[in-house]
Amino acid sequence: MSNFELSKGDLYKLFTDQERYDNSSGGVYQVFNVRKADASGAKKKPLIMITDGVYHMKSLLRGSAATKFQLQRGDIIRVTAGEANYFPQRNKYALAIDDFELVETGVELVNRASKFLDAYFNEHPNERLIVPSSNIENTTTDATSANNATEQNPSQQQQQQQQQRKQSNFPSSHSQKSKPIFAIEQLSPYQNIWTIKARVSYKGEIKKWHNQRGDGSLFNVNFLDTSGEIRATAFNENAEKFSEILQEGKVYYVSKARLQPAKPQFTNLTHPYELNLDRDTVIEECFDEDNVPKTHFNFIKLDAIPNQENNTNVDVLGVIQTVNPHFELTSRAGKRFDRRDISIVDESGFEISVGLWNQQAIDFNLPEGSVVAIKGVRVSDFGGKSLSMGFNSTLVPNPEIPEAYSLKGWYDSTGRNGNFTSLKQEAGSNNISSANQEKFISQRITITRAQAENLGKSEKGDYFSVKAAISFLKVDNFAYPACSNENCNKKVIEQPDGTWRCEKCETNNEAPQWRYMLTISVMDETNQLWLTLFNDQAEQLLDIDANKLIALKENDPEEFTKITQSIQMNQYDFRIRAREDSYNDQTRIRYTVANLHKLNYKGEADYLATRLSNALLA
């Protein structure tokens, strides 16, 4: 039985009831969302989103609340010391929490569709109290404007707030310039009237499709302002229209677009919603580019990429070390692609391959030694870690940002002649340099140690390496039928007519593309562990694709058994990702193989000999 009951409607009451506003402590709320850690290592203010089950709003943790421990989404807290704050210059609301009690953890969100309080008061400005402005630091508020507002007397503030309400209720119909501008992060479906001032940070090509419902086309862009980015999509005739209007790098006023939940499989942005540009959408070019950033990156260093999950999108900054020739390849479906691989390096001492596709692969002409910033590039872990440009990825050559100048200075002075650890080489021990081989072996731990240290209980999971032998392989349900359409891989369902239905693509295909989801047991000298291998890793282990192995199981059981037993009791180096998983109301740690390779026995012997020599000399 739960130990909590949310203070439903209390966040609304904080700003409509004077007594509640003056004493803002005591409420029981759920953590609706948490700000992601900055991958660049820069410190950010501890900002979270809280909900009372009806409304949600921003909350700044300060004082002892900021130093207690990191809250997670779903946590239930009771605010023991807090202060409600209003920022009239930007019409923003926040609850500053100075101290709290943790009531319960690991709770499902009570109401995912709760209303954003800022949006509600923007639509109902006459319901809230007339309160003094606040001085607390807020990452989405212009601190200077907020501080200036506190110097006005109450009557001046009231006049200013009344004027803001008038502007919200009666915007000029002649131009969007006179309308109140919303920050992108404020946008939600609960707002009917809004205008954003944003730059087109990415513009895609018009894509055509054909299915059972007919032909169609789509076009998408990303809009950027100081608060964040949001994806926008237009279909069919609107795709043609807005593709002509919107130009990458220019700033526009945008209003009357429909807001809908974002589709994570099609975007690398974190905004929970996206815009649908339809015939009612109004877009007007803005020639005042003040306070509109040209781009926004959350860079991670290359040495952090081994800890990134497969198929996640990251932003990286690097110097081009090698530009390889353009070549052609053919997919399993028979489709031909243009491809070019480049490698980049940074100060962390790592080198990684970046795959360029199609026209970008053909036209690429940057020289080695150039700095590139790449936004939304996909992480791949087949044959080691690498990066691949996707539809929504953006490559910016020689960006005019401080990080790029610093990186270029490092490369010209020392980096040009440096030795780098290649992340691509981790897949095959035969290609690993002796220095890297020693590093990989020295980082291994035992299975017992991984379990004793509770690896996997952190928010993003943990990675570790073990040397272990395969003791058992599950031959039942080792693969699933996936959609054969390019870049889909969703599970399909066989239909009465013998075709296979993909609900995501809304198509029926003659046959599925079988993909591995293989379970094995491994053991070392200390303990045993169950591991899951997805398609790329299982194919690397068995040296046969899932379609062929399924066929052998049905048509040649003897050869099937020979293949599956050939790997048993063989030792491998496993790079393992551990992460907590909930199933049937039980929490357990799930272990998946991020990478593996056969043992290099010469490298193993050299490592042991070096360790022994060092021990004798000590």
Image (tube, rainbow, N blue to C red):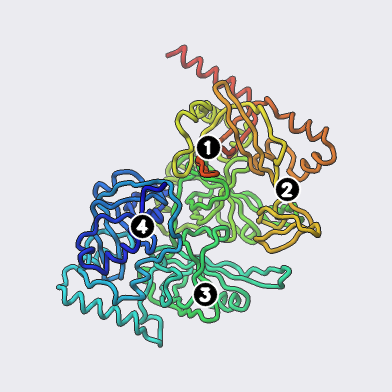
Which numbered tag is attached to residue 514? Answer: 2
Viewer-nearest residue: 52 or 505: 52
Nearest the camera: 296 or 419? 296
Q: Which residue is mark 1?
A: 421
Give how far apart the Cα atoms at labels 3 and 2 are. 41 Å
Q: What residue is shown with label 3?
A: 246
Residue 37 in sight in this render:
no
State which mark lies toward you, 3 or 4: 4
- Name the residue nearer the viewer: 425 or 534: 534
Q: Secondary structure at mark 1?
A: strand
Q: Is residue 238 left or right of residue 18?
A: right
x%, y% of residue 456? 48, 38
x, y percentage for residue 47? 34, 55
Going by the numbered disc 2, the residue's amino acid type is Trp
Whichever of callouts 2 and 1 sits on the residue coming sooner in the sequence is 1
Q: Nearer the viewer, mark 2 or mark 4?
A: 4
How much space separates mark 2 and mark 1, taking CA atoms?
A: 35 Å
